[in-house]
Amino acid sequence: MRERGGTGRRTRLRIWRPKGHGSSTLPVRTTLLAAFLVAQSAQIFAQAAPERFWVAGRYDGNRVIVYFDKVKFEGALARRGRKIAPPVADLFFDPVELPAEYIGQFQNKPGAEHFAIGDHYDLILGNGITATIKLTTLVGCEADEEVGNDSFIGALATIEPPNSLIFTQNYYAVRRHHESRASAAKVRPKTAAEYRKYAGFVDEPVRLDTETEMARLLDQAMKVSATDAEKALAAGVSPALKVQPFQIADGSLRYYVQAVWKSRKEKGLEYPYAVGAWIAPRPTLHVLVLEKRTNGYDDFGAPALLNVVDLGASRTGVILEIHRDASRELVLAEYRDGSAIKDMRVLQSIAAGE
């Protein structure tokens, strides 16, 4: 029997007893349900917090720059920042050095990366090569926020071991540091077979007959998607190509091709037609998806592929520059066959426009 306090009323509380047992215990079903809910909550939380990646650029011979988070300085950066030299890699704009206490106020927001001087991260260079970087200087970059641009906070980082940036692209991916992964990355691929295990550029010339077939395929695509005015100017003109072979994480070969039709009849700097294309060689050479021209005045006009990196877990990352007539954007995205850039999962984007 059990009394409820304050009423004087007695209520009988039934105790569940497993059959064949004299002592009272909590229901097994209740315990299992609680365990299931805890497991489900942990799974949902894990799904809601995927691994983060950031894009980095070469700052100088032995350092890189990375922006971790978007912020709004609201005009206060000029009072707090100390001017430093611009980075070698473009699209990181004009960073300034910032004190740790000023950076700290932006790290209290939900989802912010908690980084500090002395922290280590992994720098994914491409072709299965990963180096460790150590944050040495906290920085920020203020854009024209009044027209909707984002500002950024991040850091300069020194690469370990030194001189690892020699003969690499100027753009890389960054992830949080893991000792086990860093130890494995110290053993660099040495043979062609070992390199084929990782996503990255393929440093081999493209055969002339392959380029000829690419030009034919893209000329067919132009005749379908170009306007009548563009077709009139490009008719009978062979496209100029920039071909970049790369392999995805499973070792399969792919090409990214930028093509432009220079008819020499156009006025000014604008070319009549330009396109980008993701191409696969098997079973026969074929276009997976086209990228529309984003700029009318560049040599090629379509997005430029700056690097290909291996993100682990059979994932391929692509770093691209998208130059529009009034804006520029640096994008780190997860590559998928058949997906245009706009449909890929964007891991980070750094952009500024007028």
Image: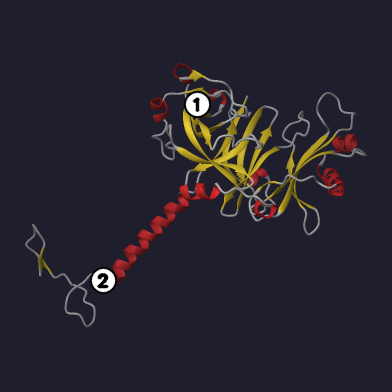
Q: Which residue, given by chain and number where applicable, does mark 2 sit on?
A: 27
Q: How many numbered callouts?
A: 2
Q: CA distance from mark 2 to mark 1?
A: 57 Å
Secondary structure beneath dot 2 equals loop
Q: Is residue 301 left or right of residue 265?
A: left
Labels 2 and 1: the sequence-earlier one:
2
Residue drawn at point x = 48 percent, y = 43 percent:
176
**Crowd band around label 1 with a 10 angstrom C-alpha radius: few (<14), some (14–19), many (20+):** many
Using the image as rendered, state which of residue 39 and residue 178 is in the foreground. 178
- Give the percent coordinates (x, y) of residue 183: 50, 48
Using the image as rendered, state which of residue 144 and residue 142 is in the foreground. 142
Position of the N terminus, as image quadrant, is bottom left
Q: Are marks 2 and 1 in contact (CB under 8 Å)?
A: no
Residue 85 appears in the rendering:
yes
- Give the percent coordinates (x, y) of residue 79: 45, 16
Q: Is residue 7 left or right of residue 327?
A: left
Q: Is residue 316 left or right of residue 265?
A: left
Residue 350 appears in the rendering:
no
Using the image as rendered, state which of residue 135 and residue 340 is in the foreground. 135
Secondary structure beneath dot 1 equals strand
Q: Which residue, given by chain and number where applicable, does mark 1 sit on?
A: 140
Three-letter amino acid code of the residue under disc 2:
Pro
Q: Residue furthest left?
A: 8
Q: Is residue 298 above or below residue 177?
A: above
- Give the percent coordinates (x, y) of residue 193: 68, 55
**Crowd band around label 2 with a 10 angstrom C-alpha radius: few (<14), some (14–19), many (20+):** few
Q: Residue furthest top?
A: 79
Position of the C terminus, as image quadrant, is top right
